[in-house]
């Protein structure tokens, strides 16, 4: 594919039917009311010159290059700011406007370095293009260094690791400032000074790295010149071809143009037609792709007989043969159920599908689970119980129609930044915001946004809080009676339950720590919203009552009639790129693809017939059960696809002991990760740039992942899985990943209409995609719930067993930050470490003061199960008694302190509540060797 | 046998390996039962048995039943659940 230049219509599209007819240069065109003349002209095939306009931003009207003549109108209006009118006659090429445009260009060029031939934007510069379009042949005021006063000696800001800011090339069109405002919503940039002194500035004149800039790249993308330019373009030159693919970071699943020179990736540019992101990006997807070519990549298979041995690099044949032989030997000795596998939410649907197929058909059991176990498994359980299917209800665009947005246990500006930008845009337009979170996350108060209510509840009290809100709805007559009577069941029992005094905001105030009046006000606001939408994250699911809370939110949404249309719904913000997809593909030990239980004879027979095997009708082991069974000796071998359980799963000591107890650990990954330290086989994996398949994002959108370059290992991951299965005696072969998707579509009703050919044609689809909905289903449960009627579930609040005590008086909660991702395997191998070189502990000033802790001190963090050492940051956004850290760096090992507590329904770990003590560390951390011989991070000393 | 911390009416059974196969299973059973506290035992047992059949690996169910047989469980809801699973 050659370099893809998307058409730029100059100004955004306007909603509504095309009803306004006009002519542009004699050509008739009909557009929606409110459309600009510039955009209408583009639809008519006429490009009007422009510099300050681009269709991702509202019209600004500053460059005066887009002037036109309109019959009956005075002067020469800017076409970008002039809306169309019925019967309008527009002339874009007249002698008058041509002269005006040349005059404007002359002024621009008189203060621009004329270094086009050596400029990094040569061939991709709109200023250069416009000079040509306007026919500029001379600059009467001099140019470059010969001109009068100019800006040519302004210094270049190279502080950002990914892009440069060369002020000497700036034409002050404000596109970067407006992109930061309108697209990203950070408002980090401004135009400093007036008139000739006007210049783009990051904050108060500080370098970009010291400003509020979040490096999303929107300004770089908007810049029409080389002023804001990717360093890779400066270093490598302009790319020459593009491949449209999908980001491999968070569950937003942004579409990108991977732009290359030959086989060298130069830059990732967000794709305007991407349904999830519509041309926006964050620092990870836009810039942090360098890990794919990092020297740490493992490119050849390795094996060893014992984890005490050195790795031996071997051929693919030997590695696959070794793996299959050992798996079969272990099964022969310890039984069919003694082996299993974990699928990865970072892998494609096709790769995940073949792993669960390997387990069910070649292993002959259901011991397959996925890393969603430790993040969103309660979402699957809770939404299936209440609505009938394990997925969010809306598309991302839906937030633009929300009147009240409730964000519960999520930090979108860090975890899901591109969706956060959409949300912030709606909030700036006036939608109300309720934040339910112990921490004062950035969204609570940011430029032009302030939460109407921040319910800073105590960690672990989610269910008490959501019940209290539902109590207000029911007891204050705010229930949507028409909706619940028509569309729900078990209503009366639930109403009676939730109306109980024990659920009142006053009764639970001592549990949640939130004043009852605030809860009542928030509940009323949500119930009377018009369109009320709930967005949530792992602060909901990673609790001992994660599933109960998901059902509690579903109850509230149904009670207020906020399901089944634009602007409402229950929306899980998925942590990893393919959490939704890995769950869809049958990764859970109790479900076949499409969330159908293994005990369903009719469903099982579909696979038994196709795969030629008898399948078990009993659920298999979940990840925590695998660990427990490894320790009791009934589970002996584990295949781990692209997940670093030794770092990411809770209670590291327990996980390490379980892994060390296994006879065989097979790791399929890009790097020798923490889990690989316990492995006997390392099968090198492929980065997203090498994969061919699909990801499914948090809005159920199935997007193509196209190979940008050939696999660096020589194989696709699904090929390796198929070869392991073959070597175990089960025939599995595919010619391509498209063939795997064909099998998924053949066997999974919600994917029946999906194929690579269909996706290549329409871009993406949201499941269900079948004969009834060939273009997919953006909004679910519109005419009825998947299960028939929505089911109200009585959600009793049960406190977690994890309690603070005199010995462990603080509660630790964990999460992620913008620049790093999950266990950091990818982002730690990029320049993103510039923002977050180590995990830190955020602690309230009061809690710090009583412990004698100052900002930046090294502190010991101890829980009932372990201890680690890290640096403290004093943060007044933390409530008293609660501290916070991330788990991006293995050297810190935050999960050394998290416990075995888990959700009652799904075993999802309770990462969000750990009783801890924090004290000044007496010394630095050290690496000691535990009983397994594997390095274990401990503090040498300290409180 | 030591009573499991925080799970009323359930005590642990250590296996031959030193690691108790029953301990995590019993803890989980106790936590599920706690979700339905206050409801009739038969109702709780029906829901729990259905949940356990749907989501627990057979060896976990066997571990629960073995613990019940060993007298390690006192919670009436868990005992009633075990009887339903056994049928």
Image: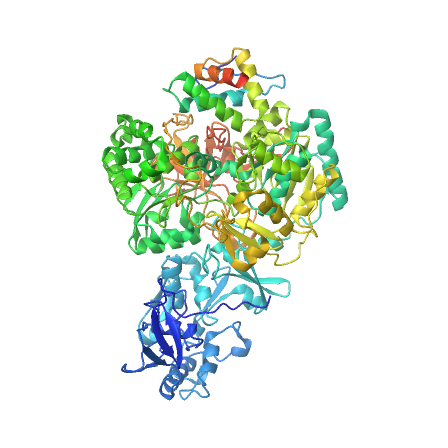
Q: Residue at x 47, y 15 (%)?
A: B80
Q: How is the image coloured?
A: rainbow
Task: Report the quarter where the C terminus of chain A lies.
Answer: top left
Residue A283's x, y, as percent?
Answer: 48, 55
Q: Is residue A310 visible?
A: no
Which quarter of the rendered picture does the N terminus of chain A lie within? bottom right
Q: Position of residue A183 (x, y in %)?
A: 39, 60
Quadrant of res A801: top left
Q: Residue at x 38, y 79 (%)?
A: A24
Residue closer to the observer: A927 or A401: A401
Is A458 placed left or right of A624 in the picture? left
Q: Residue furthest front?
A: A771
Indicate whether B70 appears above or below A498.
Answer: above
Q: Is residue A30 visible?
A: yes
Is A660 drawn above or below residue A439 in the view shown? above
Q: Quadrant of residue A519?
A: top left
Q: Quadrant of residue A497?
A: top left
The spot of residue A29 in percent (x, y) is 39, 74
> Which residue is more in the foreground, A420 or A331?
A331
Q: Is residue A256 above or below residue A827?
A: below
Residue found at x 62% / y 30%: A616
In this rendering, position of residue A687 left or right of residue A227: right
């Amino acid at each position: 594919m050659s370099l893809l230049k998307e058409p730029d219509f100059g100004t955004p599209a306007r909603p509504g039917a095309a009803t306004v007819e006009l002519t542009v240069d004699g050509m008739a065109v009909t557009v929606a009311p409110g459309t600009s003349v510039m955009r209408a002209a583009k639809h008519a095939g006429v490009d009007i010159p422009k510099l300050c306009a681009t269709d991702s931003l509202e019209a600004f009207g500053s460059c005066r290059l887009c002037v036109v003549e309109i019959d009956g109108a005075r002067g020469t209006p800017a076409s970008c700011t002039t809306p169309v009118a019925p019967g309008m006659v527009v002339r874009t090429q007249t002698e008058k406007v041509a002269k005006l445009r040349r005059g404007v260009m002359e002024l621009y060029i008189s203060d621009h370095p004329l270094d086009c031939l050596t400029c990094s934007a040569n061939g991709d510069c709109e200023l250069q293009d416009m000079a040509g379009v306007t026919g500029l042949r001379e600059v009467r005021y001099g140019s470059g260094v010969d001109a009068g006063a100019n800006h040519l000696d302004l210094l270049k800001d190279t502080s950002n690791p990914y892009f440069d800011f060369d002020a000497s090339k700036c034409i002050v069109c404000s596109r970067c400032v407006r992109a930061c405002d309108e697209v990203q919503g950070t408002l980090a940039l401004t135009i400093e000074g007036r008139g000739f002194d006007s210049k783009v500035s990051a904050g108060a004149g500080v370098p970009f790295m010291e400003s509020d800039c979040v490096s999303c790249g929107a300004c770089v993308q908007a810049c029409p010149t080389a002023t804001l330019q990717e360093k890779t373009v400066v270093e490598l030159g302009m790319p020459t071809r593009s491949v449209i693919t999908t980001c491999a970071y968070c569950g937003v699943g942004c579409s990108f143009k991977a732009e290359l020179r030959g086989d060298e990736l130069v830059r990732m540019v967000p794709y305007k037609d991407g349904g999830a992101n519509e041309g926006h990006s964050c620092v990870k997807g836009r810039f942090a792709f360098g890990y794919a070519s990092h020297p740490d990549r493992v490119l050849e298979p390795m094996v060893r007989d014992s984890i005490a041995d050195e790795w031996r690099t071997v051929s693919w044949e030997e590695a696959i043969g070794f793996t299959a032989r050992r798996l079969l030997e272990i099964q022969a000795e310890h039984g069919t159920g003694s082996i299993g596998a974990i699928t990865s939410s970072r892998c494609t649907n096709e790769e995940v599908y073949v792993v669960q197929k390997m387990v069910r058909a070649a292993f002959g059991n259901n011991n397959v689970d996925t890393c969603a176990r430790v993040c969103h498994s309660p979402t699957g359980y809770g939404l299936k119980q209440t609505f009938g299917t394990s997925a969010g209800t809306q598309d991302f665009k839906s937030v633009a129609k929300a009147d009240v947005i409730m964000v519960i246990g999520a930090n979108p500006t860090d975890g899901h930044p591109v969706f956060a930008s959409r949300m912030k845009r709606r909030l700036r337009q006036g939608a109300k915001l309720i934040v339910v979170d112990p921490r004062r996350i950035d969204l609570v108060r940011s430029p032009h946004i302030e939460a109407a209510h921040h319910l800073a509840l105590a960690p672990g009290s989610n269910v008490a809080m959501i019940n209290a809100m539902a109590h207000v709805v029911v007891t204050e007559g705010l229930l949507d009676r028409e909706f619940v009577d028509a569309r729900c069941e078990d209503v009366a029992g639930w109403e009676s339950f939730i109306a109980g005094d024990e659920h009142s905001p006053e009764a639970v105030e001592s549990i949640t720590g939130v004043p009852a009046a605030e809860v009542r006000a928030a509940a009323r606001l949500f119930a009377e919203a018009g369109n009320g939408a709930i967005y949530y994250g792992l602060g909901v699911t990673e609790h001992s009552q994660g599933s109960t809370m998901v059902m509690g939110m579903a109850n509230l949404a149904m009670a207020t009639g906020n399901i089944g249309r634009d602007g409402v719904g229950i929306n899980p913000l998925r942590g990893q790129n393919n959490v939704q997809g890995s769950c869809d593909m049958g990764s859970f030990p109790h479900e076949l693809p499409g969330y159908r239980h293994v005990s369903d004879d009719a469903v099982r027979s579909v696979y038994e017939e196709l795969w030629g095997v008898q399948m078990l009708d009993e659920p298999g082991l979940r990840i925590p059960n695998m660990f427990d069974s490894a320790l009791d000796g009934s589970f002996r071998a584990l295949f781990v696809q692209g997940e670093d359980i030794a770092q990411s799963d809770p209670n590291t000591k327990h996980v390490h002991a379980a892994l060390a107890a296994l006879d065989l650990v097979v790791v399929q990954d890009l790097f020798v990760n923490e889990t690989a330290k316990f492995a006997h086989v390392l099968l090198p994996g492929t980065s997203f740039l090498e994969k061919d398949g699909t990801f499914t994002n948090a809005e159920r959108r199935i997007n193509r992942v196209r190979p940008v370059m050939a696999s660096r290992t020589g194989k696709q991951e699904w090929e390796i899985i198929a070869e392991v299965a073959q070597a175990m005696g089960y025939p599995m072969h595919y010619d391509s990943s498209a063939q795997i998707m064909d099998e998924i579509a053949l066997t999974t009703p919600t994917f029946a209409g999906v194929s690579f050919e269909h996706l290549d044609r329409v871009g993406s689809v949201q499941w269900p995609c079948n004969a009834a909905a060939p273009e997919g289903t953006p909004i679910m449960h519109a005419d009825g719930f998947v299960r028939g009627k929505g089911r109200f579930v009585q959600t009793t609040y049960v406190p977690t067993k994890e309690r603070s005590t005199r010995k462990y008086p603080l509660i630790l909660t964990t999460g992620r930050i913008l620049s790093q991702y999950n266990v950091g395997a990818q982002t730690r191998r990029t320049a993103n470490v510039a923002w977050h070189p180590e995990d830190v502990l955020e602690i309230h000033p009061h809690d710090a003061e009583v412990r004698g802790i100052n900002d930046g001190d090294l502190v010991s963090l101890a829980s009932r199960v372990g201890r680690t050492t890290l640096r403290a940051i004093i943060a007044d956004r933390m409530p008293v008694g609660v501290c916070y850290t991330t788990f991006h760096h293995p050297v810190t090992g935050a999960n050394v302190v998290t416990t075995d507590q888990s959700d009652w329904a799904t075993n999802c770990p309770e990462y969000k509540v750990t009783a801890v003590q924090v004290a000044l560390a007496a010394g630095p951390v050290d690496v000691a060797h535990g009983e397994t011989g594997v390095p274990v991070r401990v503090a040498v000393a300290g409180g | 046998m030591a009573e499991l911390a925080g799970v009323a009416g359930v005590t642990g059974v250590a296996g031959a390996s030193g690691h108790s196969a029953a301990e995590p299973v019993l803890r989980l059973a106790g936590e599920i039962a706690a979700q339905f506290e206050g409801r009739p035992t038969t109702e709780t047992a029906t829901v729990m048995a259905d949940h356990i059949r749907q989501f627990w690996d057979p060896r976990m169910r066997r571990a629960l039943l073995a613990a019940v047989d060993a007298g390690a469980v006192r919670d009436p809801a868990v005992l009633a659940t075990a009887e339903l699973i056994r049928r």
